[in-house]
Image (cartoon, rainbow, N blue to C red):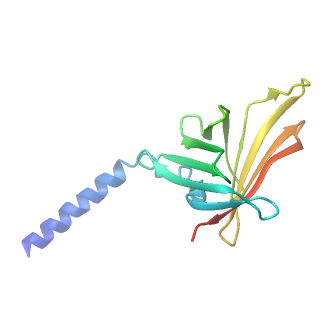
Amino acid sequence: MLTFFTLQWVRAQDTQAATDNCNCCTDLHRAFDFWIGDWEVTGPTGSPAGTNRIERIQGGCVLQEHWVGAGGANTGTSLNFYNARMGVWEQLWVDNTGSALKLSGGPEGGRMVMSSEPFRDTAGNERVHRITWTPREDGTVRQHWEVLQDGKTVQTLFDGVYRRKQ
C-alpha cells in the first residue's frame, strides 16, 4: 500500500514539474492550434493546390509548416510562434524559389491575422501582405492571402481551403 501512495506522489510531482516548466502553455500560445494537422489544400474552384503539414516543435512553442504545392515543384516551410515579449504572433516563411516573408499579428475574432511590414511595389505604391486563417464549423480552415494598398485589397495571392487528410 505504501508503494502505491509513493508512486502516486512521484507521478503527481512529475506532472507538477511538467506544468511548471511549460513555457508556452498560455491561451495566447495556443491561439493557432486550429491549424495543426495534415491537410489537403484546394483552391477556390476546388482544384488541388497542395498539401500542408503543421506540427508543434520546440517543446510546443513553435508551429512548423511543411508546404508542398500540387505537382511537388513548389515547396516551403514556415516557423510560427507567439512572441510573448512583443505580444504578437510571428511567421517566417521561406520557400524553394528563394522567397521569404515575415509576418506578425495575432488572433482576431477567432481567426489568425498576420501582416507584413509595408513595402513598395514596382510602381512605388506602398503595400502590405495580409494572411488570414479562418477555422470553419465543418473543420476546414480557409487561408486568404491578400495584398493591401491604403487598407483595401488590390490582389489576392492565395485563397485556399484546408481539409484534414483522411
Instruction: Residue 71 in the image: state x and y as whole percent.
Output: 67, 53
Closer to us: 160 or 2: 160
Q: Is residue 31 visible?
A: no
Q: Is residue 58 above or below residue 119?
A: below
Q: Is residue 105 left or right of residue 4?
A: right
Drawn side of residue 136 relative to residue 82, left or right: right
Question: How far from the left and from the top, in percent, is residue 120?
Answer: 83, 25
The residue at the point 67 percent across, 66 percent down is 140
- Residue 40: x %, y % from top left: 64, 62
Image quarter for residue 27?
bottom right
Is 11 left, or right, of 62 in this rendering?
Answer: left
Residue 166: give x, y in percent of width and height.
Answer: 57, 71
Question: Where 23 sits versus 138, above or below?
Answer: above
Q: Is residue 102 above or below residue 122?
A: below
Extreme residue toward the bottom, this view: 1
Question: Going 58% across and 42% down the picture, which residue do you hit?
Answer: 78
Left or right: residue 132 compared with residue 59? right
Q: Looking at this view, is 99 or 24 the one in front?
A: 99
What residue is drawn where x is 18% and y is 61%? 10
Quadrant in the picture for the N terminus? bottom left
Question: What residue sits 45% from the left and 48% below the top?
Answer: 57
Image quadrant assignment for residue 76: top right
